[in-house]
Amino acid sequence: MSDSVNSVPRQPKIVVCPTCGGDSVYAPSNPYRPFCSERCRQIDFGAWASENFRMSTEAPPDDQEFGDPKVQ
């Protein structure tokens, strides 16, 4: 039994490159996915390695103990 839907080649998914905002092919044919190029991947890695992607935290005041204030 042949299904015509399965015989149609799938188009690769196009996503936005997280670094430059350009089009990026999200498929096994692009070894840098989700980035569009090695350059964009390296820029992102450099930002990560230099800790530019930090999560902001709200530290408790110095006179409070650490932990969940609801539990204390």
Image (spheres, helix red, strand yellow):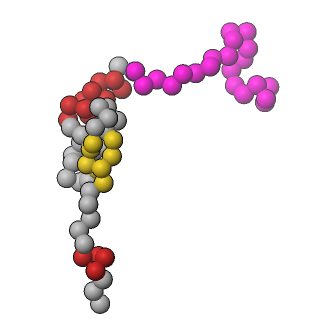
Residue 54 position in % (x across, y down):
46, 23
Residue drawn at x 80%, y 25% as measured from the top left:
72
Residue drawn at x 24%, y 40% as measured from the top left:
36
The question of residue 57 being in magenta is answered with yes
The question of residue 60 being in magenta is answered with yes
On the question of residue 35 being in view, the answer is: no
Residue 3 position in % (x across, y down):
30, 83
- 57 relative to 47 in the view: left or right: right
Residue 35 position in % (x across, y down):
28, 39
Picture quadrant of residue 10: bottom left
Residue drawn at x 21%, y 37% as measured from the top left:
37
Relative height, residue 32 to residue 46 (above, below): below
On the question of residue 36 being in view, the answer is: yes
Q: Which residues are magenta?
A: 52-72
Closer-to-camera residue (38/51):
38
Residue 53 position in % (x across, y down):
42, 25
